[in-house]
Image: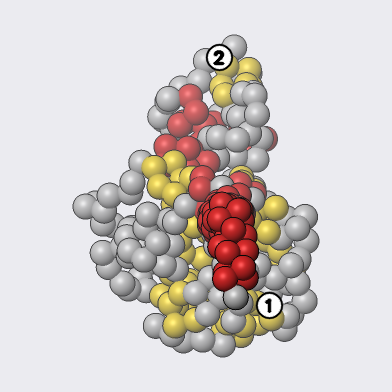
């Protein structure tokens, strides 16, 4: 019995360090494993964060519209398509970003007449081909401000004006039937009217306008009429540029001039170049009563 105890004691003495070391190694392994798991969790969390940042769209394109839910208009009435007409105290911002998120094309028709001068008149929208009775959809959520009829051969004929939370108003002209009433709330893509040929129109089409605080914008600067999608999620409105475009004094390429001949008048020059006397006066800094001199250069473009 004593021999067995002595043998066991000797084995304990001989192998105790090995057992202790094994425990140490086991603890080190477990600790390292825990550390690796922690590092792995951190790596996964970092990768997920990195992926999230990478997938985020460009801030410049997706930045929220500063006027997103702010009504920039002080009044609500149906007096005029231009809501600021006759209101001298109204202030149009010099620069403003306008959100085009959620835009729905009212009708995907071929452009039959673009924005610009047309026979002495400024065409402040774009004409899109349709058939009488085709559905016309509203571009964004909004509220109907105007529902009127200008007559069989006058102006817009049957038309609607809708005000939107992004600050824009859209105008829909030459309709055959209006399906919403003044003050109705509408949702983007909702059918609000049927296409027609009413008012001053030579054939069925939709006259579509985009206006910011009454200033008519050129739809070609806003939309791609091949895809019928907005060119950008944000449109940068610049008052100075927009007012020039509205008067037909921007975006027309190089200037062009007419050399005055005997018998020329501003009215005759305007007729020849399909413009207006008022526009000629603005381009040349003159009054309509000015006497023209033979050889004088008159800018018409």
Point out which mark residue 92 bears. none
The secondary element bearing badge 1 is classed as loop
Q: Position of residue 282 (x, y in %)?
A: 45, 31
**Which residue is pictured at 33% across the width and 63% down the height?**
70
- Residue designated by label 2: 296
Q: Is residue 132 visible?
A: yes
Among all residues in the image, which is located at the extreme front?
2
Which quadrant of the figure contains the N terminus?
Answer: bottom right
Q: Position of residue 258 (x, y in %)?
A: 63, 22
Question: Distance of mark 1 from mark 2, alpha carbons?
Answer: 46 Å
Q: Position of residue 163 (x, y in %)?
A: 43, 69
Please rate how many residues cluster around mark 2, counting C-alpha atoms within 10 Å: few if below 14, some from 14 to 19, many from 20.
few
**Which residue is pictured at 65% across the width and 29% down the height?**
253
Q: Position of residue 281 (x, y in %)?
A: 46, 31
Please rate how many residues cluster around mark 1, counting C-alpha atoms within 10 Å: few if below 14, some from 14 to 19, many from 20.
many
Say whether residue 70 is left or right of residue 236. Answer: left
Point out which mark residue 196 bears. 1
**Which residue is pictured at 26% across the width and 53% down the height?**
90
Relative depth, front residue between 143 and 252: 143
Coloring applied to the structure: secondary structure
The secondary element bearing badge 2 is classed as loop
Relative depth, front residue between 245 and 49: 49
Residue contact between numbered discs 1 and 2, judged by CB atoms under 8 Å: no
Say whether residue 257 is left or right of residue 109. Answer: left
Relative depth, front residue between 5 and 238: 5
Looking at marks 1 and 2 on the same chain, the residue that comes earlier in the sequence is marked by 1
Q: Is residue 233 visible?
A: no
Compared to residue 238, the image places residue 150 above or below, namely below
Among all residues in the image, which is located at the extreme top?
295
Mark 1 vs mark 2, foreground winner is: 1
**Which residue is pictured at 60% across the width and 29% down the height?**
301
């Amino acid at each position: 019995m004593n021999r067995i105890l002595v043998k066991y004691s000797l084995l304990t003495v001989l192998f105790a360090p090995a057992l202790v070391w094994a425990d140490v190694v086991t603890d080190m392994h477990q600790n390292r494993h825990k550390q690796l798991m922690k590092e792995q969790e951190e790596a996964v969390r970092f990768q997920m964060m990195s992926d999230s940042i990478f997938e985020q769209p460009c801030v410049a394109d997706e930045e929220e519209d500063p006027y997103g839910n702010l009504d920039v208009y002080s009044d609500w009435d149906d007096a005029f398509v231009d809501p600021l007409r006759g209101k001298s105290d109204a202030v149009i911002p010099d620069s403003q970003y306008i959100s085009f998120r959620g835009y729905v094309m009212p009708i995907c028709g071929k452009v039959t007449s673009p924005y610009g001068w047309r026979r002495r008149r400024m065409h402040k929208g774009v004409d899109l081909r349709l058939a009488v009775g085709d559905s016309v959809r509203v571009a964004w959520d909004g509220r109907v401000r105007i529902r009127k009829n200008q007559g069989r051969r006058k102006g817009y004929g049957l038309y609607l004006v809708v005000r939107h939370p992004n600050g824009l108003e859209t105008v829909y002209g030459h309709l055959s039937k209006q399906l919403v009433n003044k003050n109705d709330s509408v949702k983007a893509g909702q059918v609000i009217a049927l296409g027609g040929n009413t008012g001053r129109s030579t054939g069925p089409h939709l006259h579509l306008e985009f206006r910011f605080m009454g200033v008519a914008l050129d739809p070609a600067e806003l939309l791609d009429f091949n895809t019928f999608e907005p060119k950008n999620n944000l449109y940068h409105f610049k008052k100075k540029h927009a007012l020039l475009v509205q008067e037909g004094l921007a975006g027309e390429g190089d200037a062009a001039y007419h050399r005055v001949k005997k018998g020329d008048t501003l009215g005759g020059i305007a007729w020849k170049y399909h413009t207006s006397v008022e526009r000629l006066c603005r381009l040349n800094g003159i009054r309509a009563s000015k006497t023209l001199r033979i050889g004088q250069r008159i800018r018409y473009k």
